[in-house]
Image (cartoon, grey):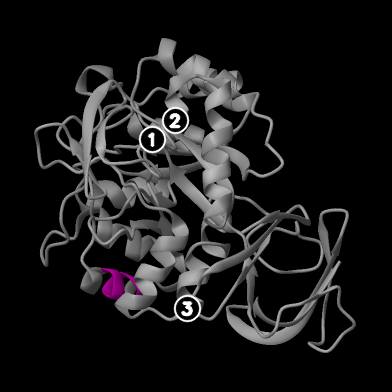
């Protein structure tokens, strides 16, 4: 298959060219006028998006432990440009997380759905004070043995784990677990020095920056300042509710290519307003805004990466910066080496977008699945 006459996203910028792929793998980047099976008519061809922080969609949550629940979410992702995702779990007891690990580990991708590229354990190793929408009764001190049991239950699929680095045992946990996956700081009260020690111990990522951590203050820069100084990658929820557009612009200037845009979507994504459940707690979605029932506490989002790309471009980021932050940056942050870029030898996961950023085609492993 050859797609020609395209604006290809290569090396962080758009270039006219063609892209060839067979047997699910990109084989060549060629000239725009190469003989082609598909004429892109000058439209954008970009890597498939990679969402490293999403709890679910279409009424399904990855913590439920329901094998049949993953396919509807995977289809929702693919329909919005996400070709790979990390199934993200909540702060729950081991006896609840273990069947969830089994279910995710046994997931078989539907032909029209995104690929589950691994698991993000968002907890249970978090801070009580910054737990947000995580259930307090399920919090657990950082415990490498528990991590290894959950990872084994999943078949070794855990690629990212969030931890509050000020908690007892966190530093040895980070030192050990960072050998197995990416360790992220989040839902934490850590000050700058503690966060720096955690990054030096092996952490390399920050979970939904600004949310669930101390604010950046001029004499107390906290996790945010430590992430900047250590060169960590940082997540940002760009649904227009969690982070002000000015802060999104500022964060891109601060962190550059270390910025990772995430959805942090919940089971209410793709669903009508109403009441739902998250980690054993009731949540309510009104006008697309999800909060713990009866409170103003934000509980993830109902967004998706395609809408967030449109958001950040409307906020003033370049399209190039936006695409990088949903493709190559997240893939690199969690060690996915074969996706996130248009390059010979990588998986043929790519999207065709028109000039208004409408999704026209989605290819996963070289197969057109619609748009």
Secondary structure under tag 1 reads loop
The one of 221 and 309 positioned closer to us in this rendering:
309
- Callouts 2 and 1 close, C-beta under 8 Å: yes
**Comes first in the chain, label 2 or label 3:** 2
Q: Which mark's residue is nearer the viewer, 1 or 3?
A: 1
Which mark is drawn over residue 267?
Answer: 1
- Residue drawn at the location 51% of the way across and 15% of the way down: 99
Q: Which residue is mark 3?
A: 319
Secondary structure under tag 3 reads helix
The one of 48 and 361 positioned closer to us in this rendering:
361
- Residue drawn at the location 66% of the way across and 56% of the way down: 370
- Residue drawn at the location 38% of the way across and 35% of the way down: 267
Q: Main secondary structure of the magenta part?
A: helix
Mark 2 Cα-neighbour bin, 10 Å: few <14, some 14–19, many ≥20 = many
Q: x, y percentage for residue 152?
A: 60, 20
Q: Is residue 7 above or below residue 275?
A: below
Mark 1 Cα-neighbour bin, 10 Å: few <14, some 14–19, many ≥20 = many
The one of 371 and 73 positioned closer to us in this rendering:
371
């Amino acid at each position: 298959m050859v797609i020609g006459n395209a604006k290809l996203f290569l090396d962080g910028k758009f270039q006219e060219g063609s892209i060839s792929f067979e047997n699910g793998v990109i084989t060549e980047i060629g000239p725009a006028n190469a003989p082609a099976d598909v004429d892109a008519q000058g439209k954008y061809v970009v890597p498939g998006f990679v969402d490293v922080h999403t709890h679910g969609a279409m009424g399904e949550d990855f913590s439920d432990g329901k094998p049949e629940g993953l396919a509807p979410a995977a289809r929702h992702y693919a329909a919005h440009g996400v070709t790979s995702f990390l199934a993200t779990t909540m702060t729950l007891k081991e006896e609840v997380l273990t069947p969830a690990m089994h279910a995710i580990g046994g997931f078989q991708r539907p032909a029209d759905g995104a690929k589950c590229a691994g698991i993000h354990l968002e907890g249970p190793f978090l801070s009580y004070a910054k737990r947000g929408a995580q259930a307090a009764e399920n919090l657990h001190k950082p415990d490498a043995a528990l991590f290894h049991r959950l990872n084994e239950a999943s078949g070794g699929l855990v690629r990212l784990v969030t931890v509050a680095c000020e908690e007892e045992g966190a530093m040895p946990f980070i030192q050990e677990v960072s050998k197995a996956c990416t360790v992220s700081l989040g839902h934490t009260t850590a000050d700058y020095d503690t966060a720096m020690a955690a990054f030096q111990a092996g952490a390399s990522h920050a979970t939904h920056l600004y949310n669930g951590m101390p604010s950046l203050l001029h004499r107390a820069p906290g996790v945010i300042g430590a992430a900047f100084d250590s060169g960590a990658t940082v997540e940002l929820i760009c649904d227009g509710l969690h982070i002000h557009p000015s802060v999104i612009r500022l964060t891109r200037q601060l962190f550059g290519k270390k910025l990772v845009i995430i959805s942090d979507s919940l089971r209410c994504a793709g669903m009508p307003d109403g009441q739902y459940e998250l980690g054993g707690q009731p949540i309510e979605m009104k006008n697309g805004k999800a909060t713990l029932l009866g409170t103003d506490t934000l509980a993830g989002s109902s967004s998706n990466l395609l809408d967030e790309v449109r958001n950040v471009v409307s906020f003033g980021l370049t399209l190039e910066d936006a695409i990088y932050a949903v493709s190559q940056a997240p893939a690199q942050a969690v060690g996915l080496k074969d996706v996130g870029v248009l390059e010979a030898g990588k998986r043929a996961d790519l999207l065709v977008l028109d000039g208004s950023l409408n999704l026209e085609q989605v290819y996963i492993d070289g197969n057109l699945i619609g748009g």
